[in-house]
Image: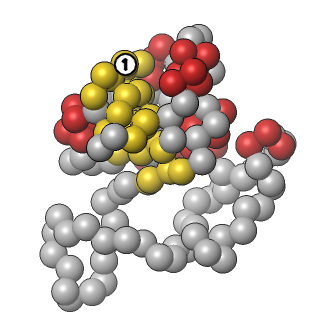
Amino acid sequence: MLENINEIKEFKPETAIVLGSGLGALADRVEKAAAFPYSKISGFPVSTAPSHKGELVIGTLAGKRVAVFNGRVHLYEGYTAKETAAPVRLAKQLGIKNIILTNAAGGISKSLNCGDFMLIKDHISSFVPSPLTGKNDDRLGVRFPDMSNA
């Protein structure tokens, strides 16, 4: 996917973070950062959403080696479910074991206000078709991952 992926593999990021709307400034806090525009990553979709910079930032954050995906792509941009999963697939290819996915999620609790942080403990997949559709790449994991403890 990435022409110089070995450079990133040698750095050995521990955690991937996929940033969504309003969180791009976190990528600016990554120290000793190297940035790779999505357009330079072979086969990687490029975000068109406002405030999604569209770059992979590699470095350290709070003393941890990270790969920060500054922006992502969405179905509403015309991408397939498989294409929207590109950051997760690339993180796996880089050997990353931990991933933090962010998004602007709606909440039904009256105790939540716009801009509050919340941890999603469960979800219902609304991807139609599923990003798991098509030939399975065993290097990326099992066909149907266990979601009982998502």
| Quarter of the image with the N terminus in it | top right
Residue reaching furthest front? 63
Q: Nearer the viewer, residue 121 or 83?
A: 121
For image coordinates 15% across by 75% down, the residue present is 113
For image coordinates 20% across by 88% down, the residue present is 110
Residue reaching furthest top? 3
Q: In the image, residue 143 lies at what x, y percent?
A: 80, 55
Helix, strand or loop for disc 1: strand
Count of number-bearing discs: 1
Is 85 displayed left or right of 75 in the figure? right
Q: In the image, residue 96 lies at what x, y percent?
A: 58, 41
Can residue 17 be seen at all in this image of the molecule? yes
Q: In the image, residue 135 lies at what x, y percent?
A: 84, 42
- 122 shown above or below 92: below
- 84 shown above or below 119: above
Q: In the image, residue 6 lies at what x, y percent?
A: 61, 16
Can residue 90 be seen at all in this image of the molecule? no
* Residue hosting label 1: 34
Q: Nearer the viewer, residue 33 or 52?
A: 33
Is 47 displayed left or right of 109 in the figure? right
For image coordinates 33% across by 47% down, the residue present is 20
Locate residue 72: give its quadrant: top left
